[in-house]
Structures are given as structure tokens and as C-alpha cells.
Image (cartoon, grey):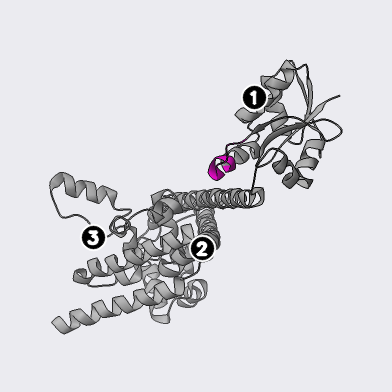
């Protein structure tokens, strides 16, 4: 008859069909160490206690065993080829350990098993949450990378389309700096002879004055004529660009959703786009949470910092956080102070998101607004 093997916070046990303990290997009475062993077991990795117990039982002539974990049974079968491991859910050992853990603990002289198990489960839960958060971090990092790839590819295509269409209507290039509007005009109108004021306003939603300028330029253009076959290939490329624009919006919305789950405080302080990029550059939320505010302030400006150190020039005052409107739109002499205030709140938000999960984003954002207002007020007094 096979013996039945299962694990608990106490250790690894072997029972016979009648529910009698045949042998066991006790785990060290350390919460963290036991949590680590159980986490390994859940991943299908045998512990030294498994190996020791099975070796002992095989010396006594036992060769057949059941376990409740298929990955664990497969790994042990690879190691102990002369034994036979089968999966049985539930098996006698698992049922006994779940139903009579307190009695078994008393039998082997283990006091306070309930409190011990509670602490081990707390550590396991915390580890699981961190692991899941790290996996979600990876989604943010990959999504930011995809956004960058989309932007690079889109810029290449837009540059090519502008050069291409400028053969036919060169004046449009400087009249319409907005890429999306430029593409929409080509898609909707095509031939420059179709660029009437009314058609332009309808196709791109431009003002009457802007549309009139473009229409006049089209009427007097010095560009070459295009056949429909020329426009067909160009429009196909334009369609791809517009689809990339739509894809970018979808990915940005997806990142916003991830940020609301993983880093709601960081999102509240600095926004999803900047917050996600900070996480990506840092390598994860945990890594970002361990960074001082001074490092966060220049995160993303590593090349500029390296050049400054190499040439003994002035180091950059801000990295990715320059994209924050209050930093980007501030006078140069205020940017450093506002960037420091912002990076300080970002550091706090990242730590709260990584450690406690409590939402204090509204409070941090309000404090940041007040600090920025004080900085601006102080500089006005100096003037």
C-alpha cells in the first residue's frame, strides 16, 4: 500500500491509509524560512525535508507514495527513479493535516501552531502581493516600450509622407505643422485641386482663416502633378499612420488603467504617462520607491548627466519630470525648485504605493500645488 505525503507549516509528513503518522521531517521554527519553503512547494520545488523523508522511507522498504501536487510528484519522480509517485487529491496526509493540525502539533511537541501558521500565511500573502505587483510592473514597462516604438515608427512614416506629398504640394508642409491634421487632409482630399476652403474646414476642422490660406497656397502651388496611382500608395501609408495613432491611444488608456491599480498615488501626483515612464526607467515600482528624491528628479536624464560629469559642465536639473506642465511651463529660474518639490512628492507617492497601498494621492497633490504656488509667490516678491 502506498504512503501518503503532504506538507503544512509543521513540516513534511507521511501517513498510512489509516491516518497514522509513519514519519515526518519538521521545518525550522522560523516564520520567514517556513514561508519560503511553502512558497517553493507551491511552485513545485521539493524541499530538503521531502528528500530526507523519502530517503528514510525508501530505506525502510517503501516505494509507493501519493502527493497532492502534480509538479511536486513529477520533480520527486525524476530524483527518486526507484520509487513511484502518484497524484491523489485529496490524499490521507493532506486531509489529516488540514483537519487535525492542532492535534498533530501537540503530538510532536509544537506549541502555538495557530499563531505560527497565521504569521507564515501573512508572510506568504505579502510575498504573493509583491510578486503580483512585480508582474504588473512588467506590463507597465513593456507598454511604455511599445509606446516608444510606436512613436519612433510613426515619426519615420510621417517624415516620409511629408517629403513624399511635398513633391505635389510643398507649401502644405509649413502651413500644417500638426501631423494628424496633415494626414487627414491627404486622406480626405488627395489632389491639391480638391483643397478648397470649405473642403479643408470639413476635413480637418480648421478655422476659416487657416483654411483660406491653405486653399490659396494649393491654387498657386509650384508642386508636380500626381496621378491617382501615386496618391493611392500615399493614402495607404497615411491610413497606417492613423491606425498607429489609434493604437497609441489604446495603449495609453491601458497604461492609465494599470497605473490606477498599481500606483494610484503616483498617478494622482504626476499623472499616468510620467508615472509609468518613471517606473519603467527605474525598473519597477519597488526600485522607484527605494530611490531618493534627488535621483528621481534627474531620472531619464542619465546621458545628459554623464556628459556633464565628463565635461565638468552643469548637471541637468530634471529628467522625465520635465514633462510635468508646471515644470515645463515655468521660467528657467523656477524649474529647479519646482522639480525638487515634485520629485519629493513622487518619492513619497511611490513608497506608499509600494509598501502600504493606502491612497493619499489627493493630499500629496494638494500639498504639491500649494508648494508650487508658494515658490511662484516668493519669486514675485523678489521681483
User: Residue 24 placed where, x, y %?
Assistant: 70, 31
Residue 158 visible within the image: no
Distance between mark 1 and mark 2 Cα atoms: 41 Å
Element on which disc 3 rests: loop
The answer to whether residue 238 is magenta is: no
Label 3 crowd (10 A; few <14 / some 14-19 / many >=20): some
Between tags 3 and 2, which lies in front?
2
The residue that mark 3 highlights is 317
Q: Residue at x 52, y 75 (%)?
A: 202
Q: Nearer the viewer, residue 118 or 169?
A: 118
The residue that mark 1 highlights is 52
Judge whether 196 appears above or below 113 on screen.
below
The residue that mark 2 highlights is 357
Quarter in which the N terminus is drawn: top right
Quarter in which the C terminus is drawn: bottom left
Which mark sits nearer the N-terminus, 3 or 2?
3
Judge whether 134 appears above or below 252 on screen.
above
Q: Quadrant of residue 35?
A: top right
Amino acid at each position: 500500500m502506498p504512503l501518503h505525503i503532504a506538507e503544512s507549516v509543521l513540516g513534511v509528513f507521511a501517513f498510512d491509509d489509516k491516518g497514522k503518522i509513519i514519519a515526518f521531517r519538521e521545518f525550522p521554527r522560523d516564520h520567514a524560512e517556513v514561508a519560503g519553503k511553502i512558497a517553493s512547494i507551491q511552485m513545485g520545488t521539493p524541499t530538503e525535508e521531502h528528500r530526507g523523508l523519502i530517503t528514510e522511507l525508501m530505506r525502510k522498504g517503501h516505494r509507493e507514495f501519493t502527493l497532492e501536487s502534480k509538479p511536486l510528484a513529477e520533480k520527486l519522480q525524476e530524483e527518486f527513479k526507484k520509487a513511484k509517485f502518484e497524484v491523489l487529491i485529496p490524499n490521507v496526509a493532506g486531509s489529516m493535516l488540514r483537519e487535525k493540525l492542532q492535534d498533530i502539533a501537540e503530538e510532536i511537541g509544537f506549541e502555538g501552531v495557530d499563531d505560527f501558521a497565521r504569521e507564515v500565511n501573512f508572510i506568504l500573502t505579502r510575498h504573493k502581493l509583491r510578486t503580483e505587483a512585480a508582474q504588473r510592473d512588467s506590463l507597465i514597462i513593456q507598454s511604455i516600450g511599445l509606446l516608444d516604438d510606436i512613436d519612433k515608427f510613426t515619426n519615420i512614416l510621417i517624415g516620409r509622407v511629408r517629403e513624399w506629398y511635398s513633391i505635389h504640394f510643398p507649401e502644405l508642409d509649413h502651413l500644417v505643422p500638426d501631423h494628424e491634421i496633415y494626414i487627414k487632409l491627404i486622406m480626405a482630399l488627395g489632389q491639391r485641386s480638391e483643397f478648397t476652403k470649405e473642403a479643408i474646414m470639413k476635413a480637418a476642422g480648421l478655422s476659416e482663416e487657416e483654411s483660406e490660406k491653405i486653399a490659396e497656397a494649393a491654387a498657386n502651388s509650384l508642386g508636380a502633378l500626381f496621378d491617382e496611382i501615386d496618391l493611392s500608395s500615399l493614402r495607404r501609408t497615411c491610413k497606417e499612420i492613423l491606425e498607429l495613432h489609434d493604437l497609441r491611444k489604446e495603449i495609453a488608456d491601458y497604461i492609465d488603467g494599470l497605473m490606477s491599480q498599481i500606483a494610484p498615488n503616483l498617478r494622482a501626483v504626476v499623472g499616468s504617462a510620467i508615472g509609468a515612464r518613471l517606473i519603467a526607467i527605474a525598473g519597477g515600482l519597488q526600485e522607484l520607491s527605494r530611490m531618493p528624491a534627488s535621483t528621481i528628479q534627474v531620472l531619464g536624464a542619465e546621458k545628459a548627466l554623464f556628459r556633464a560629469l565628463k565635461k565638468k559642465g552643469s548637471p541637468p536639473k530634471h529628467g522625465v519630470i520635465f514633462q510635468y506642465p508646471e515644470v515645463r511651463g515655468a521660467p528657467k529660474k523656477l524649474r529647479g525648485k519646482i522639480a525638487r518639490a515634485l520629485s519629493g512628492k513622487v518619492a513619497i507617492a511611490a513608497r506608499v504605493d509600494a509598501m502600504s497601498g493606502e491612497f493619499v494621492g489627493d493630499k500629496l497633490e494638494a500639498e504639491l500645488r500649494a508648494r508650487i504656488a508658494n515658490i511662484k509667490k516668493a519669486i514675485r516678491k523678489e521681483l
